[in-house]
Amino acid sequence: MVKLRLKRCGRKQRAVYRIVAIDVRSRREGRDLRKVGFYDPIKNQTCLNVPAILYFLEKGAQPTRTVYDILRNAELFKEKERTLS
């Protein structure tokens, strides 16, 4: 099973995260299938590869709670509904 989750990057006390599609059995810093976005909690910036995220969601990938909140704030699910309509 594939999940969309955060992968920690950056240095001490200055964490930034990549949003990645990764196998459930992999550890947090493990090998990812594909990088699909970027999240900086300090600057509150997000950069998303929307077609890649929609592809993995259509294939059954489950976002973690935090990633789901990031995608909801970016209004990705409204965009997904528009493409399905």
Image (cartoon, rainbow, N blue to C red):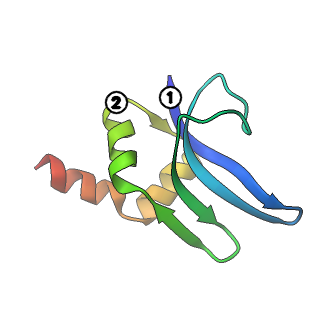
Residue 76 in percent (x, y) is at: 35, 58
Count of numbered circles on the image = 2
CA gap between label 2 and label 1 equals 9 Å
Which of the labelled discs sits on residue 59, or is there none? Answer: 2
- In this view, the residue in front, 78 or 16, is 16
* Callout 2–callout 1 Cβ contact below 8 Å: yes
Amino acid found under the numbered disc labelled 2:
Lys
User: What label does residue 15 carry, if any?
Assistant: none
Secondary structure at numbered mark 2? loop
Where residue 9 sits, quadrant-wise, is bottom right
Q: Residue shown at 66%/56% (left/top)?
A: 17
Residue 85 locus on image (x, y percent): 10, 50
How crowded is the residue under tag 2: few (<14 C-alpha within 10 Å), some, or many (20+)? few
Tag 1's secondary structure? strand
Q: In this view, does 2 lie to the left or right of 82?
A: right
Q: Residues within 10 Å of mark 1 (few under 14, many from 20)?
A: many
Say which amino acid is labelled 1: Val
Residue at 32% from the left image edge and 51% from the top image edge = 51
Residue position for label 1: 2
